[in-house]
Image (tube, grey):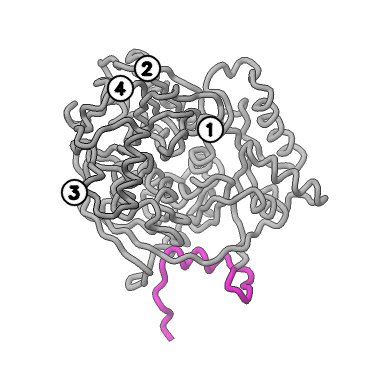
Amino acid sequence: MTPSPRTLFDKVWDAHVMATRSDGQALLAIDRHLLHEGSFHAFGMIDHAGRRVRRPDLTVAIADHYVPSRGRDRPIPDPEIAAMVSGLAENARRHGIRHFGLDDPGQGIVHVLAPEQGLTLPGLTVVCGDSHTSTHGAFGALGFGIGATEVAHVLATQALWQRRPKTLRVGIDGRLGPHVAAKDVILAIIGRIGAGGAVGHVLEYAGSAIRGLSMEGRLTICNMSIEAGARAGMIAPDETTFAFLEGRPFAPKGDLFARAVAAWRTLPSDPGARFDREEILDAQAIAPAVTWGTSPETAVPVTARVPDPAGEPEAGRAAQMRAMLDYMGLSPGTPLEAVAIDRVFIGSCTNSRIEDLRAAAGVLRGRRAAVPGLVVPGSGPVRRQAEAEGLDAVFRAAGLEWGEPGCSMCVGINGDLVPPGERCASTTNRNFPGRQGPNARTHLMSPAMVAAAAVAGRLTDVRRFGEP
């Protein structure tokens, strides 16, 4: 009997199911467990239960959320943050876990560090106490965020009960236009299906436009899957994936790598595999985008105008739009390119890789920013590569600050905040009220678009600056 065609998700999920309960939940084996400073709750739980970490060799601790963006040569001034950073180091030491602390040359944002170290591999299950663990799906892995109790469960058992999600394929064919980046692609997808459009689903991104992206671009796409409500996002591994992984510190070596690639080639969705839903977008219709509201689903082409709630027939949606515009301080009908900004931020697990920094520097080179801003690379290796290429000098010459690797102003829990009432052009993934600080107003966009906004002092179409 010929087996039924299966999706990429089906193959990875089925390979990790160890048991199934009567209610349909499956016990999944977990291949990689990534921890950050916020994991202290889970360590407290297993300590209280008298348990040890089941598989420290499959567990990695990374300091990233609370770490300072400046002054790493001095003690962390905030005692609470200092205790969290040192506590992660101590928990890792007690349990024999590989720890990427502030003194480690590989330290960085968890979702930047794990891929570049070769810890994320096709076909693996990857979990972390962070919603943007969907990032790792760019390699054909199943990555998803988990809560503190689940973190403790994985620490103790290296397994996790989960309910099988549905599947949603997003196909994008065609050639992306000049200055249209992966960030614009994912914003267009979220704008199409909505912030809750993929709830209960795993997204698979496919089509020639997706295959044409670098690994950095694919990581950006999968990173923001959660912003559409998805449990995870996945892209089938291919030659681009294999070339990226070869030689990475934790990736297989020599003959093991060749054998791994042979196995990874079997992962892409089979011809005729059925998805619960499908969406199709035309790559040529995607433009450089910005958000006008307090959700990524408010992404529109930068050449558009602020929408008018009066034209929205659904009363609830119209009220939501009015609340967003009130918070953002925008008036209906205003051209988005007329909206002045106060500062910029380039960084986060969405857009802090070397390709992102090159794109921003390409716009800023030889120009001066009209507003202040902060550029934070995603990891130590990214920072060193950027400095070797002179990108840090470009940012500094433009008047922007060059920081140390970490989450920084994306979530602001390390003290990097947008002042109240100010408007920030940001490469981050979320723009809900207060995300970058109390009463901060965030416009999401690509690194090149943020650089263009920095130069113009307002939201602006990066295509006005010429070819990339």
**Residue on which disc 1 sits:** 108
Among the two numbered marks 4 and 1 on one chain, the one whose residue lies closer to the N terminus: 1
- Secondary structure of the residue carrying tag 1 is loop
- Secondary structure of the residue carrying tag 4 is helix
Residue type pointed to by label 3: Ala
Marks 1/3: CA distance?
A: 35 Å
Percent coordinates x, y for residue 369 in the rendering: 30, 17
Snapshot quadrant of residue 95: top right
Q: Residues in magenta?
A: 1-25
Among the two numbered marks 1 and 2 on one chain, the one whose residue lies closer to the N terminus: 1
**Residue on which disc 3 sits:** 285
User: In the image, which disc is placed on residue 372?
Assistant: 2
Residue type pointed to by label 4: Ala
Marks 4/1: CA distance?
A: 25 Å
Mark 4 vs mark 1, foreground winner is: 4
Residue type pointed to by label 2: Pro
Snapshot quadrant of residue 17: bottom right
**Residue on which disc 4 sits:** 454
- Please tell me how crowded label 2 is: few (under 14), some (14-19), or many (20+) other residues with Cα within 10 Å: some
Q: Does residue 53 sit above or below 377 in this rendering?
A: below
Marks 1/2: CA distance?
A: 24 Å
